[in-house]
Image: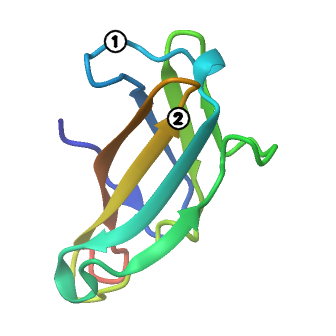
Amino acid sequence: MALNPAKEGCDALYTAVVRDATGAIVPGGQITGMRLTLYYKGGSMNGQYIRDYVDVWTSGTDEIAVDANGVLTFWFKPTDNVIGDDRLTIEVHRAEFRWTTATRVGKWWADIPVENFKVAA
């Protein structure tokens, strides 16, 4: 699924449904921990780290939430949507989510396009 580009230096909202390896929905009440790592994908910054949200689940912040239906909501901050390669019109940031419950561990990634306002027409 293609995502609308986040705007460089702006907030962006990402939503997804948390599922285990069998495809079953994981309700937020079952999640005991979650980590998010952001890094650049492609361009001259490929593979370089942007930010690591080490324990967003138990940190007491409102950065991430998963409801009873497994719907995850995450607010990317302006510092998450920084452009690393000024030559690109659209830069891709990979978001890798890792979660745990009392009996399961899972992860997925999403490629988030970020629009570079310096070179956008």
**Picture residue at 74% right of the left edge, 42% below the top:** 58
Which of 22/97 is in front? 22
Crowd class of label 1 (few under 14; some 14 to 19; many from 20; radius 10 Å): few
Q: Is residue 65 visible?
A: yes
Looking at the image, which residue sits at the far right? 60
Q: Quadrant of the C terminus?
A: bottom left
Residue type at mark 2?
Answer: Thr
Tell me where residue 116 appears, x and y as whole percent: 33, 74
Crowd class of label 2 (few under 14; some 14 to 19; many from 20; radius 10 Å): some
Determine the CA span between mark 2 and mark 1: 14 Å
Which of 94/117 is in front? 94
**The quarter of the displayed image where residue 113 is located:** bottom left
Tell me where residue 73 appears, x and y as whole percent: 54, 33
**Picture residue at 61% right of the left edge, 59% below the top:** 54
Residue type at mark 1?
Answer: Ala
Residue 24 is labelled as 1
Tell me where residue 39 appears, x and y as whole percent: 37, 70
Which mark is nearer the camera, 2 or 1? 2
Residue 100 is labelled as 2
